[in-house]
Image (cartoon, helix red, strand yellow):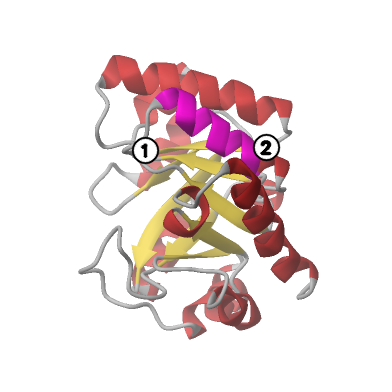
Amino acid sequence: MSDAAETVPRGLYAITPDDMALPELLIRVDAALRGGVRLLQYRDKRRDAAGRKRAAEALRDLCARHDAILVINDDLTLALAIDAGGLHLGADDGDLADARRALPRGKLLGASCYADFARARAAATAGADYVAFGAAYPSPTKPLAPLAPHRLFARSREELGVPACAIGGITLDNAPSLVAAGADLIAVISDLFTVADSAEIERRARAYQRLFEENP
């Protein structure tokens, strides 16, 4: 954990879908930011390097206008190139300790820990500012992911002293139990960005944020 851990904004953690044209993506992300999102992860497994850089720069500028933090998924080089607010790494996407050393002071580092508390402990020791457990529920993005017990969220706070993020299959209907269980962040893709229009995205973002306001 670094001093940046104290700046992790509790609440909805929006993660971009990777199958959306950039103009539409920016419209939808803007709606989520208007709804109160203060932490956005750019996740993109389809564009080439040049396309990812263009999208990341546009998202960085959009986040700056809303006083939000942009985190780059699985690409330290891109995070450094565009001066993103942070980096998130999965199990096979780079060494956390090396990333911690490479990131400038004040940048966030997150780690996917799946359903493995030992991995979360190692991530915190390596300098992660938050750890993510999932799938919280069966997920359309990663249907084969094992489910993570809800008790991991409170345990992370108590034993590791870092914020814990829930991810996977989360909706407005099942999110309250995760917040009650101690999740500091709720990571959402489908239930936020695949709805009908921008107005509904903004409404849902506000509804997710209210869950945290009601459970301080």
Of all residues shown, which one is farthest toward the front? Answer: 196
| Vertical position of residue 203 compared to residue 80: above or below | below
Expressed as whole percent of the image width and height from the top left, the position of residue 8 reads: 65, 50
Position of the C terminus by quadrant: bottom right
Q: Which residue is mark 1?
A: 98
Tell me the SS state at disc 1.
helix
Tell me the SS state at disc 2.
loop
How crowded pointer 1 is (Cα within 10 Å; few <14, some 14-19, many 20+) is rated as few
Expressed as whole percent of the image width and height from the top left, the position of residue 85 reads: 57, 33
| Vertical position of residue 64 compared to residue 114: above or below | above
Q: Are marks 2 and 1 in contact (CB under 8 Å)?
A: no
| Vertical position of residue 56 compared to residue 17: above or below | above
Q: Nearer the viewer, residue 175 or 113?
A: 175
Q: Residue at x 63, y 57 (%)?
A: 204
Disc assigned to residue 198: none
Instruction: Name the kind of residue labelled 2 in the image.
Output: Ala
Give the label, 2 or 1, closer to the camera: 2
Q: Residue at x 54, y 80 (%)?
A: 155
Q: CA distance from mark 2 to mark 1?
A: 25 Å
| Residue 92 visible in the current orientation | yes
How crowded pointer 2 is (Cα within 10 Å; few <14, some 14-19, many 20+) is rated as some
Q: Residue at x 37, y 64 (%)?
A: 113
Instruction: Name the kind of residue labelled 1 in the image.
Output: Asp
Q: From which residue to which does the magenta span run?
A: 22-32
Expressed as whole percent of the image width and height from the top left, the position of residue 104 reads: 55, 28
Q: Identify the mark nearer the N-term, 2 or 1.
A: 2
| Residue 83 visible in the current orientation | no
Q: Nearer the viewer, residue 203 or 69?
A: 203
| Vertical position of residue 100 compared to residue 59: above or below | below
Locate residue 159 relative to residue 168 in the image: left or right.
right
Disc assigned to residue 68: 2
Residue 102 found in image quarter:
top left
